[in-house]
Image (tube, helix red, strand yellow):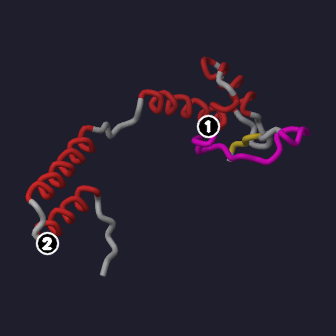
Amino acid sequence: MENKKQTVAEKFAEVARVLVAAGAQTELVDFINERKEQHEKRTTSKKRGLTKTQKENLVHVEKINAFFFEQADPEIAYTSAEVAQAVGGEIADFTPQKMTALLKQVENAEKVAQATSDKKKVGYQAK
């Protein structure tokens, strides 16, 4: 037998079925059915696309990816600040935290343990 995970709507329907079979009050069954409808309405009204920030980040990731693919020396590990300066534009003003988040999304770069002689700095190299 397959262990299929039930959705919340399916669970509400199952609870309503059990209540009917147990001879529960009609208002309890109606309450459960109302909750099921509310849940379905809520889930269908949610957006199913990327947010504005996610779309902007995709553009930045493409620029960073292009840097690693076209300009970066595969033997050199670049810090996030160096990547930001090399790519330029508005990316040059990004914080190290934002750059690190974007660099994690870049397919053409891999994280290396040490970018410089300073052991605390992490670097990224072209694959």
**Residue at label 2?**
22
Q: Nearer the viewer, mark 1 or mark 2?
A: 2
Residue 109 locus on image (x, y percent): 66, 43
Out of 63 and 17, give the one closest to the viewer: 17
- Give the residue furthest to the bottom: 1
- Pointer 1: residues within 10 angstroms few (<14), some, or many (20+)? few
Residue 103 locus on image (x, y percent): 63, 38
**Residue at x 87% of width, y 38% of height:** 116
- Give the residue furthest to the front: 25
> Label 1 amino acid?
Ala
**Residue at x 88% of width, y 42% of height:** 119
* Numbered circle sitting on residue 35: none
**Residue at x 28% of width, y 56% of height:** 8
Residue numbers of the magenta segment: 101-120
**Residue at label 1?**
101
Quarter occupied by residue 93: top right
Q: Earlier in the sequence, mark 1 or mark 2?
A: 2
Count numbered badges in the picture: 2
* Magenta stretch contains residue 48: no
Residue 66 locus on image (x, y percent): 60, 33
On screen, 60 above or below 40? above
Out of 23 and 58, give the one closest to the viewer: 23
Quarter occupied by residue 32: bottom left
On screen, 34 above or below 19? above
Q: Is residue 40 left or right of residue 52?
A: left
- Pointer 2: residues within 10 angstroms few (<14), some, or many (20+)? few
Helix, strand or loop at disc 2?
Answer: loop
